[in-house]
Image: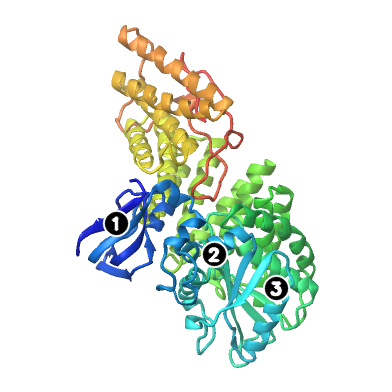
């Protein structure tokens, strides 16, 4: 749709939830009602008036509308075409009526108000602090405020909103989720990157494991932290600090703030990467020599925060040598708490520990780390409360399934139990990562499920599992689009092609093989355009083998004698060779990236290892 004006009558639908759309709008006259379809029916979210903008969330969501917009009265809208909406021009702010609808921030343009683009351009990390609760909370809030003001590339502001951050009995695990939601609303309103809230525990609340002489700080980033990434902070992480902050303690606080912030621009990411490592190096000196008045739980939380920071540095700056230090620090934290005392902390730390162990296996080539990761993720899925932390629980399930798959890839056996456990883990993850609520994650897990189903189908010559792999790939491709994540799309096409090839091989059906050709060709077109030489060669060889088999079938050349089994369950392994050869014909486990919108580069894909089976070889990434 071209940029211009558009008119709507009272009650007319401007766009519906779930529809595709890249345009955004500014209200010139009239009003617009925004609503969302939920399990409890249609809920009115907001009513907008002249000067307000809307539709931008759909742009940020990949072009899918997240709300339904309906005209209230006669409405005139200014339409901003998709390309301009994705890259807002500061000059467009002049068309907006100032002082409408967003309190003290109303003088900003709506792009700034909603996404903080003004702060993005500055490159400084915008820190917001809510006054701490508890005895002398205002005094200690000022201490943190002044300490952060002296740090590089940050801008600190106090916010007056209290909301759920001050509770009669202090901060509890039961209202962390509410605080996270309220914090993100404050950050949206104030163009902040990260919000800090905290408390000074009262003497009456202090137990033998809490000192009563320490500040307890919590953090929430404006953009949601990736629950799938090693060292990712969430609101449940608590940083204990002494009342007096010297240079080293300030450095630790600064490092935690940087690690907990999800950057919203490249310049912010560069600033974080520049300052986080020296801050953690200095801050680690006090974290590893905790004052005596810190009690057990406080010392544990301090170690966990330090481990998060070290894992974040290792991941963001690609410094795998730090992974061992991160694991040691997580273990030190676990030694100071028990499952009975802190089940949520216990489960979350084991999830992070598993993520670090996976990175250790991938980056440092330590195969024993995968076995350790399996144990860590198993503890995580058994301990993290699904109702309270559904995405953290689902992320652990997905990682557990991937680790089981990787272990089977490294050491295949005739025992199907490990692959079955992986299938169950992916199915559990998809109970949370639904296509409606988390489409990108859902597509990722669906693709993982397809890989394991394909392995089972190939290893045990089970056409029904191959059919499931094909269906899962096609479902994943409904979300994974070539235009958005081309290399992920190509990898799934390759998995699809391999599953279709095996179906064609077992059933001797030409239509399966022709569909495999199409999938491989589409995969090849992306890999070749992206300069992924290794994968381009892999796919080209796959195409050659499919073409050869097609020619043999079309000329009725006898090329394969299907073994005959009794019982008909389709799960009997076909001897030692049949138990091993699938490693060369499936998508090898890729690195465990936590990004929702990421591309797998050719360097992250393990090379296929060809092995001849009968007279056919098939390769996969």
Q: Is residue 154 left or right of residue 159?
A: right
Q: Label 2 crowding class (10 Å Cα cut-off): few <14, some 14-19, many 20+?
A: many
> Which residue is nearer to you in this view: 593 or 557?
593
Quickly name the residue at label 3. 148
Q: Which residue lies furthest to the front in this view?
A: 94
Question: Residue 495 at x, y = what percent?
Answer: 43, 32
Circle nearer the N terminus (2, 1): 1
> Which residue is nearer to you in this view: 424 or 309?
309
Label 2 sits on a secondary structure element that is helix
Position above or below: 503 against 590: above
Q: In this view, does 555 lie to the left or right of 599?
A: left
Circle nearer the N terminus (3, 1): 1
Quickly name the residue at label 1. 17
Circle nearer the N terminus (2, 3): 3
Gap between marks 3 and 1 measured at Cα: 42 Å
Quickly name the residue at label 2. 347
**For the point 68% across and 47% down, which residue is it?**
318
Kindly tell me whether residue 584 is visible in this rendering.
Answer: no
């Amino acid at each position: 749709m071209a940029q211009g004006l558009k008119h709507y009558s009272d009650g007319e639908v401007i766009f519906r939830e779930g529809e595709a759309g890249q345009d955004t709008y500014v209200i010139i006259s009239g009003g617009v009602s925004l609503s969302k379809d939920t399990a409890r029916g249609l809920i009115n979210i907001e009513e907008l008036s002249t000067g307000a903008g809307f539709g931008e969330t759909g742009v940020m969501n990949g072009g899918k509308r997240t709300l339904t917009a309906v005209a209230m009265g006669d409405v005139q809208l200014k339409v901003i075409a998709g390309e301009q909406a994705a890259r807002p021009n500061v000059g467009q702010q002049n068309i907006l009526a100032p002082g409408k609808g967003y309190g003290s921030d109303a003088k900003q343009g709506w792009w700034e108000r909603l996404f903080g683009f003004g702060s993005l351009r500055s490159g400084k990390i915008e820190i917001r602090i809510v006054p701490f609760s508890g005895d002398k909370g205002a005094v200690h809030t000022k201490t943190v405020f002044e300490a952060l003001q002296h740090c590089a590339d940050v801008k600190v502001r106090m916010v007056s909103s209290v909301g759920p951050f001050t509770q009669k009995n202090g901060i509890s695990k039961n209202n962390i989720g509410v605080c996270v939601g309220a914090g993100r609303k404050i950050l949206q309103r104030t163009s902040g990157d990260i919000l800090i809230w905290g408390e000074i525990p009262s003497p009456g609340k202090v137990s033998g494991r809490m000192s009563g002489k320490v500040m307890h700080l919590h953090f929430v980033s404006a953009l949601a932290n990736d629950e799938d990434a090693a060292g990712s902070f969430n609101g449940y992480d608590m940083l204990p600090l002494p009342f007096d902050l010297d240079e080293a303690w300030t450095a630790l606080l600064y490092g935690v703030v940087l690690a907990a912030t999800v950057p919203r621009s490249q310049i912010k990411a560069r600033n974080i990467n520049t300052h986080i490592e020296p801050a953690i190096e200095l801050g680690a000196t006090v974290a590893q020599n905790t004052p005596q008045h810190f009690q057990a739980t406080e010392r544990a939380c301090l170690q966990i925060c330090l481990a998060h920071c070290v894992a974040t540095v290792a991941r963001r700056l690609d410094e795998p040598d730090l992974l061992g230090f991160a694991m040691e620090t997580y273990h030190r934290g676990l030694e100071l708490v028990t499952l009975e005392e802190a089940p949520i902390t216990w489960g979350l730390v084991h999830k992070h520990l598993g993520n670090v162990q996976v990175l250790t296996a991938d980056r440092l080539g330590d195969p024993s780390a995968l076995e350790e990761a399996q144990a860590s993720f198993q503890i995580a899925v058994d301990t993290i409360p699904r109702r309270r932390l559904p995405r953290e629980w689902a992320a652990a399930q997905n990682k557990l399934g991937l680790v089981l798959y990787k272990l089977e890839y490294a050491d295949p056996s005739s025992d199907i139990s490990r692959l079955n456990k992986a299938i169950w883990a992916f199915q559990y993850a998809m109970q949370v990562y639904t296509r409606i609520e988390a489409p990108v994650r859902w597509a990722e897990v669906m693709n993982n499920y397809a890989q394991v189903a394909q392995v089972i189908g190939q290893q045990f010559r089970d056409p029904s599992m191959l059919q499931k792999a094909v269906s899962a790939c096609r479902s994943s491709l409904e979300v994974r689009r070539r235009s958005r994540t081309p290399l992920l799309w190509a990898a799934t096409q390759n998995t699809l092609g391999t599953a279709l090839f095996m179906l064609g091989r077992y059933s001797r059906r030409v239509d399966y093989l022709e569909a495999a050709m199409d999938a491989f060709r589409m995969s090849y077109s992306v890999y070749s355009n992206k300069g992924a030489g290794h994968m381009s060669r892999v796919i080209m060889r796959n195409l050659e083998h499919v073409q050869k088999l097609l020619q043999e079938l079309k000329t009725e050349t006898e090329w394969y004698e299907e073994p005959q089994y009794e019982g008909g369950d389709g799960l009997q392994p076909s001897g030692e060779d049949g138990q091993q050869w699938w490693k060369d014909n499936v998508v090898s486990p890729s690195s465990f990236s936590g990004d929702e919108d990421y591309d797998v580069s050719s360097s992250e894909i393990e090379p296929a290892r060809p092995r001849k089976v009968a007279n056919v070889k098939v390769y996969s990434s």
